[in-house]
Amino acid sequence: MKDHRDVLIRPVVSEKSYGLLEHNVYTFVVAPGASKPEIRDAVENLFDVSVLKVNTLNRKGKRKRNRRTGGWGTKSGQKRALVTLAEGDAIDLFEA
């Protein structure tokens, strides 16, 4: 079994992810080989909340041009997880 801190890499900070917080949905970048049950266990154990469902998506890296050589390269892709929490649960991600 993986360590829970190895499954969740970081939260996603964007306008869309902030909009989903109103619906109790949190977005994380996760390890590429992480499964939905592993993500569920990691969130429940690290933040002491109950998870209703986990949706995952794989984002392909963007193609970028190298200005010096004129060649093309790609940025690395990432796997994201959208975690829906039970009513009344919350994760304090950005408290000061």
Image (tube, helix red, strand yellow):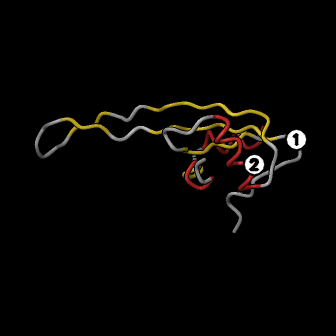
Query: Which residue is farthest bottom?
Result: 96
Q: Position of residue 42 (x, y in %)?
A: 67, 48
Residue that label 2 marks: 44
User: Does the residue at mark 2 contact the one at mark 1 (Cβ under 8 Å)?
Assistant: no
Check disc 1 and report its element: helix, strand or loop: loop
Q: Is residue 13 visible?
A: no
Q: Is residue 22 visible?
A: yes
Q: Is residue 40 left or right of residue 71?
A: right
Q: Is 90 or 8 nearer to us in this picture?
A: 8
Q: Look at 60% across and 32% down and name the residue there.
A: 56
Residue that label 1 marks: 87
Disc 2 residue crowd, few under 14, some 14–19, many 20+, Cα 10 Å: some
Q: Look at 64% across and 34% down and name the residue there.
A: 36
Q: Looking at the image, how many numbered discs can be counted on the residues? A: 2
Q: Position of residue 34 (x, y in %)?
A: 56, 39
Quarter of the picture containing the C terminus is bottom right
Q: Is residue 54 left or right of residue 9?
A: right
Q: Look at 75% across and 37% down and name the residue there.
A: 84
Disc 1 residue crowd, few under 14, some 14–19, many 20+, Cα 10 Å: few
Disc 2 marks a residue whose amino acid type is Glu
Q: Position of residue 44 (x, y in %)?
A: 75, 48
> Against 10, is 34 above or below?
above
Name the mark nearer the viewer: 2 or 1. 2
Which mark sits nearer the N-terminus, 2 or 1? 2
